[in-house]
Amino acid sequence: MLRQKSWLIVLASVLMLSLVLAGCGGSKKNSDPNQLTFMFRGGPDEQKAYNAVVEEFKKDNPGVTVKVIQTTGDQYATKLQAAITGNSIPDVFFYNPADLKAYVNSNILLDISKYIENNKEVDLKNMWADGVNFYRYDGKEVGKGALYGLPKDLGPFSLGYNKTMFEKAGIPLPDKNKPYTWDEFIKVNQELTKDTDGDGKLDQFGTGLNVQWALQAFVWSNGADWIDSTHTKVTIDEPKFIEALQFFADMQNKYKITPAIEQAQTLDTYQRWMRGELAFFPVGPWDLSTYDRELKFDYDLIPYPAGSTGKTATWIGSLGIGVSSKTANPELAAKLVTYLSASKEGQEALVKSGVQIPNLQDMAKTWAADTSTKPANKEEFIKIVTEYGRPLPGQYTYNAEWYDLFFTDVQPVIDGKMSAADYVKQEQPKMQKLLDRAVEQDEKSKK
Amino acid sequence: MKTKSNLYRKEKYFGYLFILPPVVGFLLFTLYPALYSVYGSFTDWNGLGQMNFIGLDNFKDILTDDFFYKSMFNTLFLMIGIPIGLVISLLLALGLNRKIPGTTTFRVIYYVPVISSLAAISILWQWAYNGDYGLVNQFLDLFGIKGPNWLANTATVKPALIIMTIWKGLGYSMLLYLAALQSVSRSYYEAAELDGASGFKMFRHITWPMVKPVTFFLVVTNIIGGSQIFTEINIMTPTGGPEFSSATIVFYIWQKAFDNLQMGYASAMAVILGLFIFIITLVQFKMNERSSFDVD
């Protein structure tokens, strides 16, 4: 009697445990053909805009329900990874193009080529070729082959200048068609770095660039790069690279055109720019709505100053919208992707909220031609996308650890405590080691 | 067994039933993930799919990983705040244990940080430490001191974090000390007073030994908590601080696992951290055993 009962209890516990386990790990495939989950991230303005567009999508597709999961930018990666590990990947989700290889190799993303190509409402030719190519992968190289998503948007990282400050100082405005040389850039900055209220302290500066986001413009326009064309060798120890990095550090330490070291944190230079204390500062499309609201001066966009190649350069960021390989409704999921990324209705609503530039070329041209809204030279964004923008170096490789390391350790150079030459000598082997490991992992994950 | 009553037997089963949920919870959400990460630590798991057994490779790599040592050092460094926090909270508890007006208000004030969301507190302090507009520097300005940009400076970022964690933990330790102080029988003090013991002597020979179990408990839990400090770091210095100087071990583990697709390597570090905490705690228990005594 007693035996039997205790057996029952053990049995019941095991049953319960397995039930709970099944609930956690089991396939959460929903069989409802009209239901989707959509996970995305963004600031408050973006979240509002995307929710509104999803509502529109539901209206255009009667009977369809979309469950929206939204997070802030910094939580997103963790949450998505947890969803992937837990085998409950949302049907449609944002992802970083740098993760494309890993996600495809691990069979997380669905090849949506056929749904996109068969959809008559999508005109891929009208989308930015570079933007779409970020999400192509043929199993070896990113940039060609099947489509594993569409860009949520493209983020050309442009340079802005405080027009009001120039006019007040009586300095000729920068030419939007001809980038400054480095020497010219320093000269203009030095003229604008001054004490305007006569209290003996500098309160107006040339610029205050964050090394992590602005160094690329200097390195690339000087003909150097972090990585070689095969994406297997770290090339920061080349002379052209050293020259660019040293120049970047010298802006603060030698030419003294930026706020002092202690005040150089991004937050602060960003706020100084907003208060009109800086002549030059980077501008991305995501800044436009804030700048429109907050800036009390006139600003416009110009190309970054050009190094020895004479050609300006900067990076384009992007975020992709992909479909889960496990989705029960691939066609509907792909439809939501195109609605968000490539439809006229969706793009109009998103662009209007001032958080991105249009993904559609014809729409972008009209948008850029409208000089009545600030900045007048929106054309510069388009030029970056079509002519001179490049993806960040970490995007080519299995992970960006080797690239991130460069910026983790670089502060002593920026502070003038170490020369660029010494730094790259010490850092190149460390970065190479991490890159080797990334390449190795990439090979393994293909098997 | 046979002599036990029917009722007893039934009760026993109900007892098992009642403890079932926490046991299931432990198995499911603690033991299973822990064992899984031990297994993961021997693989090159990327957190997505691929999971190949690679033996001890991860552990070998950790031995030569500068950032592992650096983040471990940072973690230990931040623990400097633990003894400081305990001393302050004991002093506060001693103060608030007296019959002075407003003690309830003070207890509430000191306890508010404990119940506040850690994320909110971190953002608050991030602003307080801002070099240009931060409250801390504005306050220092009153005395003519030009404060640094606390979180952007290798020399100040750790002290800044220590001050914040002390502030945050004060209320909790104080409350436990207060409870311990109030349970000390008055008769000890009366007896000591009759014998002519000074205030300090009474503290040393009565109060301190009587609150020692609480001190022990706080030291153990604070060290465990301190080894796992993450949220503050992640919010206040999202890149691990200048030259990685505020990155803690859990921050580094998290970065490896979720930013760099190296869940296996991260698991290996987590296993090492787990062992580290286990050993430290064991040593503490042994030491406590040796020096503890009974009052009765």
Image: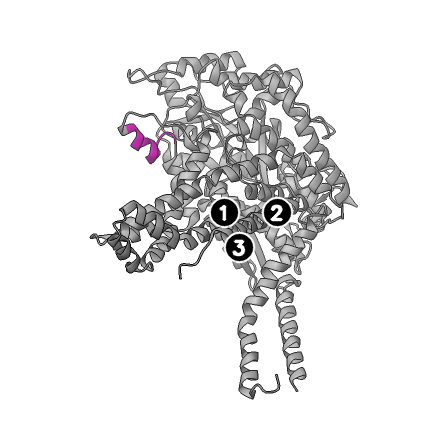
**Looking at the image, which residue is at 41% across and 31% down?**
B150
- Mark 1: amino acid: Ile
Q: Is residue B92 above or below residue A29?
A: above
Q: Is residue B236 above or below residue B2?
A: above
Q: What label sits on residue B223 in the rendered view?
A: 1
Q: Along the polypeptide, which appears first: circle 2 or circle 1?
A: 1
Q: How many marks?
A: 3
- Disc 2 versus disc 3: distance between alpha carbons? 29 Å
Taking the image as shown, residue A437 lies to the left or right of residue B180, namely right
Q: Quadrant of residue A365?
A: top right
Q: What label sits on residue B108 in the rendered view?
A: none
Taking the image as shown, residue A17 lies to the left or right of residue B110, namely right
Q: Chain of mark 2?
A: B
Whole-percent x, y for residue A369 in the image? 50, 31
Whole-percent x, y for residue A444 in the image? 77, 43
Whole-percent x, y for residue B166 in the image? 40, 43
Task: Indicate whether residue A424 is drawn in magenta.
Answer: no
Taking the image as shown, residue B276 lies to the left or right of residue B163, namely right
For the N terminus of chain A, the quadrant is: bottom right
- Mark 3: amino acid: Ile
Which numbered mark, 2 or 3, is in the foreground of this view?
2
- Mark 2: amino acid: Ala
Whole-percent x, y for residue A382 in the image? 56, 31
Q: What label sits on residue B270 in the rendered view?
A: 2
Report the residue marked by disc 3: A69
**Looking at the image, which residue is at 35% across and 18% down?**
A202
